[in-house]
Amino acid sequence: MHFWSAYIRNLTQDTKMRIDNKNILILIIVLTLLFLPVATLTTGFLRLILGILFVIIFPGYALLLAFNPKQIGLGDIERLALSFGISIAIIPFIGLILHYTTWGLEFNSILISITIFIVIVAATGYYRQLRLKKDERTSFLLKFKIPAWGSMTQLNKILLVILGLALIAAIVSLSYILAAPKQGEKFTEFYILNENGEAQDYPGQLVTGESLNIIVGIVNHEFESSSYTVITTVNGIEENVVSTGTLAHKEKYEQEIQLTPQIAGEKSRVAFNLYKDSSDKPYYDDPIYLYIDIIAPVLKK
């Protein structure tokens, strides 16, 4: 009992240490870069702790120091509280931007984007700190004290409980996201190219018996391995069947196929149908179409 009473008494005494924010920014950059391999290669407590700092503290704190590097204006508590609020606002904004890019809202794209943001603003804040005189630079007073519950006012108790619940909710939510990051939209990319590998200038005319060369392209974005079959028809008559074999997630397949229609006809419809795995139903309701004038060869007299 004597040990625990002495321990509690020590915790309620002030423990102070002032840290130059220039050094804090260096630490933020180091921990942010460290979080990349930790988040992608490991799970567990270290990933959780770095993830909490990475999401709810580092972005806002670095941004504040980049815009307000001087000691005046904000106290330590105000700066820390604003860091939390700004971080919570920044992360959805980064996600919104990613949603309209080719990378999409995937775990790796979000991780890399937030890392780049933190490193850039932290480096900016560090540079602005260096340009200031030492007595003008911001510093953070690390003060550790557990106040006695009985000595707190009713309002402070309510605020402390609300803050604690908010922090617990943030930690639980972040833990879930880090443990099971949400997958992006599942789809399969399907396209055709001309024989030069371009999505334009497709042949508009062909003589019966001549070959039409088309490149068929497929990219798997299904977050699982899948196999595909492409069946090509000319005016409903099957001309070519291509099987890709098994494609891993994000694996691309391109194959040149050769069509040699034998029946002449204006605006003959060449249809490319995609089938996934062993399904009898086309992956897309509407196939890719090409319309080509197929003409009979001119006979020389």
Image (cartoon, rainbow, N blue to C red):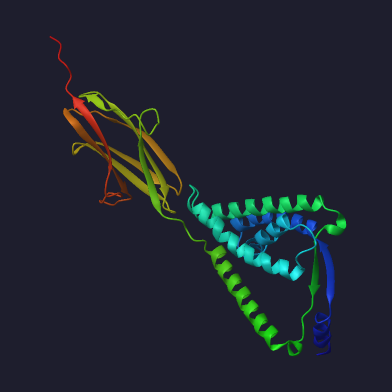
Please determine whether, in this image, residue 53 is positioned above or below residue 130: below
Residue 229's spot in the image, x, y percent? 31, 44
Residue drawn at (22%, 36%) of the image: 269
Residue drawn at (79%, 53%) of the image: 129
Q: Quadrant of residue 169?
A: bottom right
The quadrant in which the C terminus is found is: top left
Say if residue 189 shows up in the picture. yes
Report whether 112 appears left or right of 233.
Answer: right
Most extreme residue toward the left is 301
Say if residue 45 shows up in the picture. no
The quadrant in which the N terminus is found is: bottom right
Report whether 115 appears left or right of 186.
Answer: right
**Which residue is nearer to you in this view: 297 or 84?**
84
**Which residue is nearer to you in this view: 142 or 72?**
72
Q: Quadrant of residue 134?
A: bottom right
**Which residue is nearer to you in this view: 220 or 295?**
295
Residue drawn at (62%, 80%) of the image: 162
Residue 116's spot in the image, x, y percent? 63, 50
Residue drawn at (24%, 26%) of the image: 205
Residue 177's spot in the image, x, y percent? 54, 64
Q: Quadrant of residue 214?
A: top left
